[in-house]
Amino acid sequence: MQIRLVKKADIGTRRQTLIFLAAIFLALFTTGLFILFLGLNPIRVYISMINGAFGSAYRLEQTFVNAIPLIITSLGIAIAFRMKFWNIGAEGQIIMGAFFASYVALNHSDLSRPVLLSIMFLAGFIGGAIWGFIPAFFKAKWGTNETIITLMMNYVALKWIIYLQFGPWKDPSALGFPKIPNFAENAILPKLFGLHIGWIIALILVVLVYIFMNRSKKGFEIAVIGESINTARYAGINIFRTIILAMVLSGGICGIVGMIQTSGVNLTLSKEITGGVGYTAIITAWLGALKPHWIVLVSVLFAALIQGSSYIQSAFGLSAASAQLFQAIILFFVLGSEFFARYKVIFDWKSLSKAKEDRE
Amino acid sequence: MITVAFLKAAIIAGTPLLFATLGEIITEKAGNLNLGVEGMMLMGAVIGFQMGYSSNSPLLALIFAALAGGIGAFIYAFLTVSLRANQVVSGLALTIFGTGFAGFVGQKLVGLKMTDEFNDFFRELKIPGLGDIPYFGEILFNHDMFVYLGFITAIILGLYLYKTGRGLNLRAVGENPAAADAASVRITRYKYIHILIGGALCGLGGAYLSLVYVPVWQENITAGRGWIAVALVIFSAWNPYRAIFGAYLFGGLDIIGFRLQGTGIAISQYVFDMVPYVVTIIILVIVSLRKDKRNAPPKSLGEPYFREER
């Protein structure tokens, strides 16, 4: 017997969704076995997770507060990933956005609120964009490996904030506790329907990124580069400029997250500002197939997962790392499931010629 | 500042990097880019520590650390080789998994220490004769057995790659799998075996951190070293011998901040903490500047092999 693989023609959205759901189910099942192994009842754990994420107005709000940075960061990552530019530097881009926005917030709190917030927003974008521009420039100019550079820049950004927090930006009134002063009232994002207005920014960005990726010439060029750099070259696309533009947008959008998290959630800058969103968003961007509308759905579900996990941590005494494990397992299964959407497995019992007939 | 003690410490700090770099070299030679190095190191580090703590047997700790890295690599191999999943994302998923795994298992290990009896296994062993050479003896030949093991592994790997038939086959798999396949090299088997060995080496690199280098369990004990190892693969141009040099060089960078602080230079420790990362960036950019065919990655790196697509 011989096992052979045949590439499938494009399969329908319905089958694709079914395969995706089957993967999620298998991931839940596997995690369930793991939970069982820990001596807990998986059904009960899952139910309290759902309860922890949606069970009360406060928990629901927390879920959405978690979803906002995930959605926006995933959008940023999706632009780069569409180009097969493996930007795993969202973490650093968020931090630099937060740093730039905080600089404005801490030094110019005398400005009126709308002006200050607008400048902070712009500063956040610029901070992230600079952190996105650097690896893009090296990649476009000399083909330098972007994966490692973007990741190394995460560490550089993080060490920089730690330096500020323990050094020049340390709050003198905090009695030696290493913390950066809280923002003035002026520099804090207003709320709408009980939630800081980051959610409106997120929704606007979803629409803008959707239009950019699917309706604009530049968005199309980014996708072409992702498919084949040779095709792009042949089609006369300015590869250098397109890579730079995509990464300035990708980094800039992540930088906005930094502004939102400092101004809307933490009310100051700290080394914990990202909460690991930069890495989680890689998962959500991929699970959302790099499509803005799917990203929203996946991000909200993941935010619920994170919120639910933090709830069960106290209820069942599980470690904070369990959420991360859970997320990785889901990603493993979805990555594996894509195979079944793309290939058909043929078990060749008789001869090769017989299988050839089947294919035709 | 460049003293005997510093150079010796650089070699020790470079040893976990060397193991991980060698692991990634052998993986990439099979045409697979595994960005899960950091995750596999963490898995090896935490399982090695857990095993060492509960069994008090250094050997068991090492075996289980290698196994843990291998299991991580197996997940990756199954996804990318058998199921042809995207290698970059699969590797990232493995890093996230490994980080979560180490956090989960290591939760109860934070702050624990090994017994003196256990640590004695990793004491410095002076090599008779060579160890007595002035300066060089102290720098190179007066180390714990892990350091020697890393050195020997690099040489064995180099011999394997360049002097054996299997090594040639492996390089063919990484360069041109279709041609290797036509020459009846078992592509899938080659990829699996070498990805697994690579994972085991990464696991051992992690175990060196948790068992010898630190040697107390702390969260995120690798601190990005897995990623530096991925960069070192490029820096050493996929050559195990050059990896020795690269790993020790970066070992030196890793500790330079700490050393400079001792000299009383008035720069914050946190700024020095950036040094290894910034230098990695600079070196990668410089390496990408020199375009030399001999320094090129294996041709099929990152591409899934699909026989029917020829």
Image (cartoon, coloured by chain):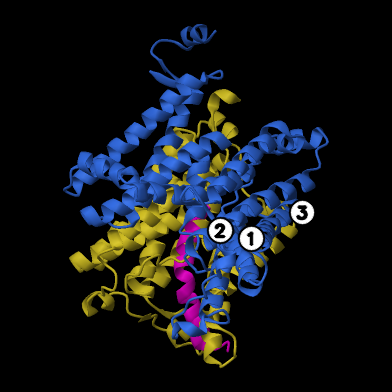
Which color has been applied to chain A in this rendered view? blue
| In this view, the mark in front (1 or 3) | 1
| Position above or below: B3 against A204 | below
Q: Residue furthest left?
A: A39
Q: Mark 1 = which residue?
A: A117
- Estimate how packed mark 3 is, as few (under 14), some (14 to 19) or many (20 or more) residues with alpha carbons within 10 Å: some
Q: Which residue is mark 2?
A: A189
Q: Mark 3 or mark 1, which is nearer the start of the sequence? A: 1
The subunit letter for the residue under badge 1 reads A
Question: Label 3 amino acid?
Answer: Lys
From the viewer's perspective, is the residue at label 3 or at label 2 nearer?
Answer: 2
For image coordinates 38% across by 68% down, the residue present is B208
According to the picture, the residue beneath numbered tag 3 turns out to be: A141
Viewer-closest of A174 and B82: A174
Amino acid type for the residue under numbered disc 2: Leu
Does B6 appear above or below B122?
A: below
Q: Position of residue A21 (x, y in %)?
A: 39, 29
Q: Name the N-terminal-most of marks 2 and 1.
A: 1
Q: CA distance from mark 2 to mark 1?
A: 7 Å
Which corner quadrant holds the C terminus of chain B? top right
- Nearer-the-camera pick, A304 or B72: A304
- Image quadrant for the N terminus of chain B? bottom right
Q: Earlier in the sequence, mark 3 or mark 2?
A: 3
Residue nearest the viewer, comparing A263 with B138? A263
Assign a secondary structure to mark 3: helix
**Mark 2 closeness class: few <14, some 14–19, many ≥20 residues within 10 Å:** many
Q: Are marks 2 and 1 in contact (CB under 8 Å)?
A: yes
The three-letter amino acid code for the residue at tag 1 is Leu
- Which colour represents chain B? yellow
Q: Position of residue A331 (x, y in %)?
A: 43, 41
Q: CA distance from mark 1 to mark 3?
A: 35 Å
